[in-house]
Image (cartoon, grey):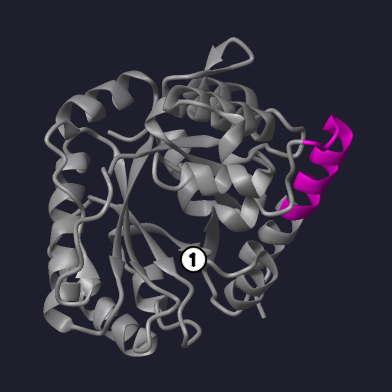
Amino acid sequence: MADAEMMSQMTGKAGFIAALDQSGGSTPGALRLYGIADSDYGSEEEMFRLMHEMRVRIMTAPAFSGDKVIGAILFEKTMDGEARGKAVPSFLWEERGVVPFLKVDKGLAAEENGVQVMKPMPDLDALLERAVKKGIFGTKMRSVIADADRAGIAAVVKQQFAIGRQILGYGLVPIIEPEVSIKSPTKQEAEAILLDEISRELDALPSGERVMIKLTIPTVADIYKPLIDHKSVARVVALSGGYSRADACAKLSRNHGMIASFSRALTEDLRVTMSDAEFDSSLARTIDQIYTASATKI
């Protein structure tokens, strides 16, 4: 069973979830934004070391605490790493009051029927066993929807919930993430179909089982309110999806009951060349802005 104190925080506390889960494909871009060029490292191992240093700098900043950051999604290598001499999941919960999640997907398959489902995860059971031992509360896995194709969207949601049930079997809370691309010419139509498909899967969950849902901020504000109110949903969170932080926060503030789970929008102002004081001050301002958009609605 999921930790009761963590579950209480996830379901009821004001705040947002930090997405610190860039993996192999997205790490170079995240490092470039931070001010580290591709030429500054010579191997994948060095790349991930630099990324871990950036994440630790974020996690150990004074403003990064459960007062406003109620959860954090980790990449597998981050879960296995340390912060101030302590395993990262333990550091987050015991020192910061931040609930740890783990990204478990292995990337996206080629597009078909306007969507990209997740690649196979043959080692998922072993990863989930490790996650439980390390004190992880829940997981996250991402698919992408580019077009309002009902068959494609249904396939995405069916796969997400099938794996979600596998994750629930380990006492972990899955974050279901069928991202609708903000570049989709049929974004609004795709979101309406997605709402139908997710609702159908939620209604089929056994009584007492709860998942979280991570979605693109919708074109029509509050369209996902039925999911937020569903008995099988612990929380609905929003990805920034390529929007700037200002745009993402403005859009999020119009969606009642939806909180942020931002990645790029969280780190867009942070630079490796900043002094610790500059870094901590910039991050604190960002956390305040995202917290406000999550907790205070228009």
In the structure shown, which secondary structural element does the residue marked by tag 1 occupy? Answer: loop
Q: Pinpoint residue 265: horizontal percent, then vertical percent.
A: 62, 58
The residue positioned 62% from the left and 40% from the top of the image is: 37
Residue 274 among those drawn in magenta: yes
The residue positioned 39% from the left and 73% from the top of the image is: 181
Q: Is residue 229 visible?
A: no
Closer-to-camera residue (14/75): 75
Quadrant in the rendering for residue 206: bottom left
Q: Pinpoint residue 195: horizontal percent, then vertical percent.
A: 29, 78
Q: Pinpoint residue 215: horizontal percent, then vertical percent.
A: 40, 66
Residue 101 falls left or right of residue 97? left
Residue 123 among those drawn in magenta: no
Instruction: Name the amino acid type tagged 1.
Output: Gly
The residue positioned 68% from the left and 69% from the top of the image is: 296
What residue span does the magenta drawing correspond to? 273-286
Crowding around mark 1 (Cα neighbors within 10 Å: few <14, some 14 to 19, many 20+) is some
Q: Can residue 182 be seen in this view?
A: yes
Q: Pinpoint residue 184: horizontal percent, then vertical percent.
A: 38, 82
Q: Quadrant of the N terminus?
A: top left
Magenta segment's dominant SS is helix
Q: Name the residue under label 1.
A: 241
Closer-to-camera residue (165/43): 43
Q: How many labels does the image show?
A: 1
Q: Is residue 229 above or below residue 2?
A: below
